[in-house]
Image (cartoon, rainbow, N blue to C red):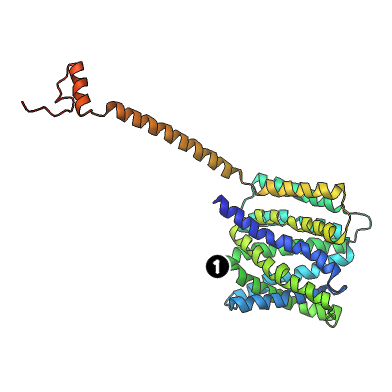
Amino acid sequence: METNWLRWIAITAIAPIAWGSTYVVTRHLLPPDAALWGAVIRSLPAGILVLLIVRRLPSGSWWWKSLVTGTLTVGGLNVLVYIAAQRLDSSLASTLMSTSAAALMLMSWMLLKQRPRLRAAGGAAVGILGVVVMMEPTTGGVDVWGVVASIGAMLASSLGFVLTARWGKDVPPLTMTGWQLVAGSLVVLPAAVIVEGAPPALDGAAVLGFAYVIVIATAVAYAAWFTGLRRLPGAAVGMVGLLNPVTGVVLGVALAGERFGMPQATGILLVIVGVLLGLVRPRAAGRLLAGRLTAGRLTAGRRAELHGSAATRPRTGRFAGAGARIRGVSPAKAGRPVPNS
């Protein structure tokens, strides 16, 4: 059981790590000032690719459910993130988005009846604090609409993910990925045409960047995330999501030469501690210890049983007769056949 838990955690972690890597890819490879078209180019081909693999379209109520969840997790999320990115520093926007760990925990409690453990809540608090320390958000001249958009993106995506877990128990994660990516892209497409006009021209670097984002950071990442939502509690999935800003900072330092000082090191350490605190299950260690103690008691009891059996087992043969004669008991009563005279 513990091995399965760690396996699903590792699979789920693919998503925030891949999403965190898109910060560097977007900044250095993708065309600027085309966030909405970037969301369409990123999500629509990925959704079509997944649908070609699964070869399954929505049916019945899943037509409107896909539209609702796709709007929350893909379409509306990207539009609100675009507004927040235009009005807020990236550090403050990332800090606000990191509170999705707490939002997923609370919404899973309300909609999925998954009551969070105190340990998970403490881990989420430590992890969010780590993001705040790491990003060093500034509060001077904060744009109110930018804050509203960032919080809206966080709440929309969290609600969409929880609804996906609630409604999608019978839908494979890869199929769910295709439906939501296509539906969400179709929601963003009109906004992209109205706000940004024609699609941006792509050079060789942009093509390579979009290829990575489409396949890895969208198709694979969403499939991994939806797998985690199906296999893990919402609180655990939210904790894993804190790896997103950590990945962005680490790759920014390693590949783009961005600043890395004591606040970043301290923040990353706090996030890691928070994630471990929220994900490690103390009951597993307790079960292991209890199992070992039980095995020890059984072994001791078995030894006592065997010792008692050896002491009370009727003796047969030459030694039984000899022992019986010494004790003054006839060989027949001692379990030895009476020799023929």
Kindly indicate the quadrant of the structure image that contains residue 156: bottom right
* Residue of label 1: 170
Residue 30: x percent and y percent? 83, 72
Closer to the camera in the image, 71 or 229: 229
Quadrant location of the C terminus? top left
Q: Is residue 251 left or right of residue 10?
A: right
Asked which secondary structure carries label 1, the reply is helix
Name which residue type carries label 1. Answer: Asp
| Residue located at (61% from left, 70% from top) | 174
Residue 108: x percent and y percent? 65, 56
Query: Is residue 276 visible in this depiction of the protein?
Result: yes
Furthest residue to the left?
341
Closer to the camera in the image, 197 or 67: 197
Up the image or down, 272 lies above or below 37; here it is: above
Up the image or down, 194 lies above or below 71; here it is: below
Residue 34: x percent and y percent? 85, 75
| Residue located at (17% from left, 19% from top) | 329
Query: Is residue 72 visible in this depiction of the protein?
Result: no
